[in-house]
Amino acid sequence: MSLTEAKGNIMHGRHYSSSTLGHGWPLAGMAGRLQGFAAPGGRRAGRGDIRTAILRLLSEEPMHGYQIIHELADRSGGVWKPSAGSVYPTLQLLCDEGLVESEQAAGKKVYHLTESGRDAVAEFDGKRAPWEDAAEAVPGGSGYHQAAGRLLQAVFQVGKTGSAAQWAAAAAVMDTARKQLYAVLAED
């Protein structure tokens, strides 16, 4: 099937959802359909995990919410990147419980532990951090997922801003990469 035919199928709803990213390329669910991309059973971090993770991070240094999200992604090797919709409500809950306080610094709300928060973190001594568990829960390791994520970003960018010639060139690169990946599996 040519690139033009594939785009026609995508744009007319054949085999793909109608949600697209620029020039008719599929977006919704594409990453989720990659075999082996998610943790076993689609594992997501539990509410207790985010609470524990935030407390542990704040025991190291004060941070704002965006820093917390990126720090967790970095420490888990890109496997666990909690949403703002889970981090900020948890920070508010921790403030309400008196474990965390916030203050404005350089136009951002920076959070730090209270004395009660430091006592709560002491309970985690000797236990594994949630980001360690998240990183190990993924088959193939986190490096695999970071590379796949970077590849998908490039694919989406070419699909969104590329010309017809660039789409054709990218399709050839992806076809070659697909064959090489199957060759890796065939090595065993």
Image: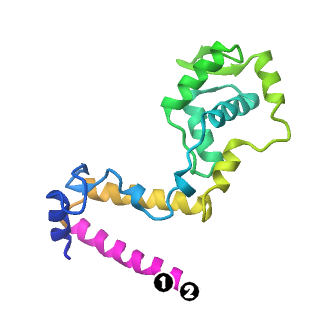
- Please say whether residue 161 is visible from this viewpoint: no
Q: Which mark is residue 141?
A: none
Most common SS among magenta residues: helix
At label 2, which amino acid type do we have? Glu
Asked if the residues shown at circle 2 and circle 1 are in contact, with their CB atoms under 8 angstroms apart, the answer is yes
- The secondary element bearing badge 2 is classed as loop
Residue matched to label 2: 187
Q: Residue furthest bottom?
A: 187
Nearest to the observer: residue 110 or residue 16:
16
Q: Is residue 38 magenta?
A: no
Q: Position of residue 19 (x, y in %)?
A: 25, 49
Tell me which corner region of the image, top left, top right, bottom left or bottom right, holds residue 32: bottom left
Tell me which corner region of the image, top left, top right, bottom left or bottom right, holds residue 16: bottom left
Residue matched to label 1: 183
- Please say whether residue 33 is visible from this viewpoint: yes
Identify which residue is drawn at 75% across, 16% down.
114
Q: Is residue 49 left or right of residue 32?
A: right
At label 1, which amino acid type do we have? Ala
- The secondary element bearing badge 1 is classed as helix
Identify which residue is drawn at 64% across, 55% down.
137
Q: Is residue 25 left or right of residue 127?
A: left
Q: Is residue 42 above or below residue 70?
A: below
**Neighbour class for label 1 at 10 Å: few (<14), some, many (≥20)?**
few
Q: Position of residue 98 (x, y in %)?
A: 70, 13
Question: Which range is magenta?
Answer: 165-188
What is the count of numbered marks?
2
